[in-house]
Amino acid sequence: MNKRPTLSLKSPAKAAAPKLRASHARDLKPALQTSFQTGLKPDSLAYSLIGAAQAVAQVRTGTNLPQALAQVWTKGDASPQARGAMQDIAYRCMRQLGQSEALIGLMAPKAPEPLVAALLACALALMTAPDEVQPYEEFTVVDQTVTAADAHPDTARAKGMVNAVLRRFLRERQALLETALMQPVAKWNYPQWWIDAAKAAWPQDWQGVLATGNSAPPLTLRINARKTTMEQYLATLDAAGMAATQIGPYAVRLAKPVGVTLIPGFADGVVSVQDAGAQLAAPLLDVQDGMRVLDACAAPGGKTCHILELADARVTALDADPKRLARVGENLERLGQQATLRTADAQSAGWWDGVPFDRILADVPCTASGIVRRHPDIRWLRRKGDTLQLATLSSKILDNLWQMLAPGGKLLFVTCSLWPQESEAQAAAFAVRNQAVRLDAPGQLLPAGGTGQDHDGLFYALFQKNA
């Protein structure tokens, strides 16, 4: 049997608090061969690993993870099972990317090419699963990662290095992890600026905020009050053998996530998937039958649909992206509801017919720092300067929408950011600029997961226009 080549790799003792090499930076935009067909068995771990790695490599060039995965799936014609495995690996990788990249920096003799680095990061994420049973045997991960590397032209030449790095990790796990975790980026799995921002915004809670963002999110459902009650739906789940807990007036958290096709009543509009924190929006608006309501930045439509489940209102769902707005239409159709869909920018007024709205929901653009447990790639895609840029855009949107609100009407400002510049500071400045009356609302919800509550980090501020 031929021996795999081994490499002389540097000792972790000589690499205390290492920094990532230049080629690990996001600015590098290589020409990845994402359409190459590897010939690997579609049901193999190797096939899923190389697919996940291709998606992760694209994230590091600025593509969001869902889009990157969709491209890999389409070009590779992946089966539903393979898609699920790739998605699981890629999301695990995103949650542990800081640690994995620090380990690679310690062990690799030189900075790997982007797809090689992504493949190693995926493998290391599977071998260092936090607080849970590892999904695969470690030696299986090593074997299948080497097989995956050998099957793709962007990684084949690094097959020996991949083998050596992963086997060294198995031998020296504890020492390597101790050295890597000296870096805050590796310890917390966030960029340094994000860690600093969390400390500044939430000096008493920042560790819990970051830790919650690294956990896998629950599958939370919103019951349709027009079609069922909480008691009835919990009984339906129990009859189906699905353990669940009520965590809000309309919110049900499943003990074990499942595909939407397996959720009782989903296809018939009895329930929808929506975070418990996001479910607060519609009740806070206090919409009454017959009211004229605007849901600005509406896609994918969860809040639009919830409003219509609670009142017979005339709702306009606005979004600048026609493809995302189409999803609003699909959700409305599934629920048997109707709304006026308008493709337009919430910052402009050219689409408006001049008739004031009684209620406006302004779920404005933001860094999405409060929903990273659902979208773990966000932390690696955002830049420090994005906060100011997005806060500036959001302030323009809020001021524009305020002109469309009827006297005595209410505007609910929502953001899924943890940064005060996008939330509380934005709300306070808006109230002063527009002489808006601020009403009771939850303010900042820090991301939380546990027995009593389980929600993302959203911010709510409610305003009323003087009559």
Image: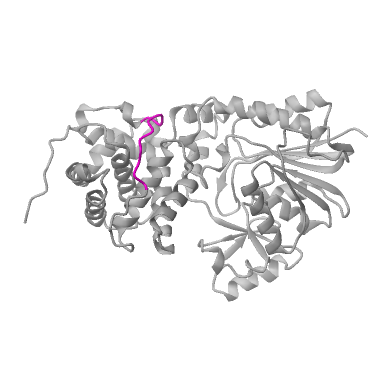
**Residue 144 located left or right of residue 441:** left
Residue 38: x and y, percent?
29, 54
Q: How many numbered discs, if any? A: 0
Q: Which residues are magenta?
A: 25-34
**Residue 427 located left or right of residue 144:** right
- What secondary structure prevails in the magenta region? loop
**Pick the front one: 77 or 210:** 77
Q: Residue furthest left?
A: 1
Q: Residue at x 51, y 45 (%)?
A: 375
**Residue 350 located left or right of residue 129:** right
Residue 28 on the magenta span: yes
**Pick the front one: 264 or 2:** 2
Q: Residue furthest right?
A: 467
Residue 376: x and y, percent?
48, 43
Q: Residue furthest bottom?
A: 239
Residue 357: x and y, percent?
85, 42
Residue 290 on the magenta span: no
Q: Is residue 436 visible?
A: yes
Q: Residue at x 32, y 41 (%)?
A: 115
**Residue 102 located left or right of residue 237:** left
Quadrant in which the N terminus is drawn: bottom left
Q: Residue at x 21, y 32 (%)?
A: 12
Q: Residue at x 18, y 32 (%)?
A: 11
Q: Is residue 20 visible?
A: no
Q: Quadrant of residue 425?
A: top right
Q: How is the image coloured?
A: one colour
Quadrant in which the C terminus is drawn: top right
